[in-house]
Amino acid sequence: KQEVTQIPAALSVPEGENLVLNCSFTDSAIYNLQWFRQDPGKGLTSLLLIQSSQREQTSGRLNASLDKSSGRSTLYIAASQPGDSATYLCAVSENFGNEKLTFGTGTRLTIIP
Amino acid sequence: NAGVTQTPKFRILKIGQSMTLQCAQDMNHNYMYWYRQDPGMGLKLIYYSVGAGITDKGEVPNGYNVSRSTTEYFPLRLELAAPSQTSVYFCASSPAAGSPLHFGNGTRLTVT
């Protein structure tokens, strides 16, 4: 059974620093990997989706990488801002659809002004 | 842009009561999903639908029912509420299989 782990559970970083969030998964037979952010009391917002054939995806200050063979993905956030404070979750899909998504428990990120 | 709208935001139920969690999306997405999020656990899929009239079970369907009579609405029914159903429930939609998910803001349900 696929398991997704995100370590650390919480991270505090001074404003302006670059940072990396980690996601690991046990079964490398994935179709895609998605990164989300969740603000307190809100739903998840999709940030990046990486297909299994891709190595990375970029959106603004965010860059997500995928190494299927090692079962790892990272989310790089450049020049962090207080507005980046949120919980970041990753999820891997075992097939083409979203019905086989396995979510991690997230990393709670706090950017210190 | 409303996106995915969930009602109510909060609800307290007594054991054995029933309720329907409402979910509506205005993006004409075919795919809709219900998840629950428990503290310290990843989101778990309850039910999903690939289009009007078609629903299927997810990982944790017991104690729940769904219907999908139109593209826009995907209500989740809890019959005979139990304390184990205390959770935050999220509805999500996507335009196609494997596309990024759009989430509602959730319903926080407490069963006592």
Image (cartoon, coloured by chain):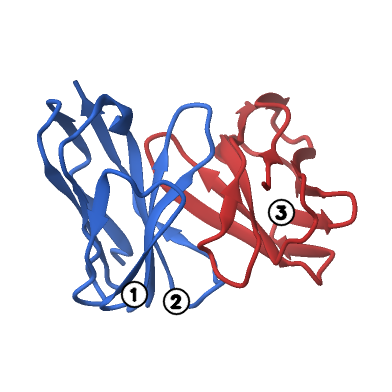
Residues tagged 3 and 2 counted as in contact (Cβ below 8 A): no
Q: CA distance from mark 2 to mark 1?
A: 8 Å
- The residue singled out by tag 1 in the image is B27
- Residue hosting label 3: A61
Q: Residues within 10 Å of mark 2 (few under 14, many from 20)?
A: some
Kindly report which numbered mark, 2 or 1, lies closer to the viewer in this rendering: 2
Residue A74 image position (x, y, % from top left): 78, 47
- Which amino acid does the dot numbered 2 rest on? Pro
Q: Are marks 2 and 1 on the same chain?
A: yes
The chain carrying label 3 is A
Q: Secondary structure at mark 2?
A: loop
**What's the distance in space between the residues labelled 3 and 1, CA to CA?**
27 Å
**Residue A63 falls in image quadrant:** bottom right
Asked if the residue at tag 1 contacts the one at tag 2, i.e. Cβ–Cβ closer than 8 Å, the answer is yes
User: Could one spot residue A92 in this view of the protein?
Assistant: yes
Q: Which chain is red?
A: A
Which residue bears the numbered disc 2?
B95
Q: Amino acid at mark 1?
A: Met
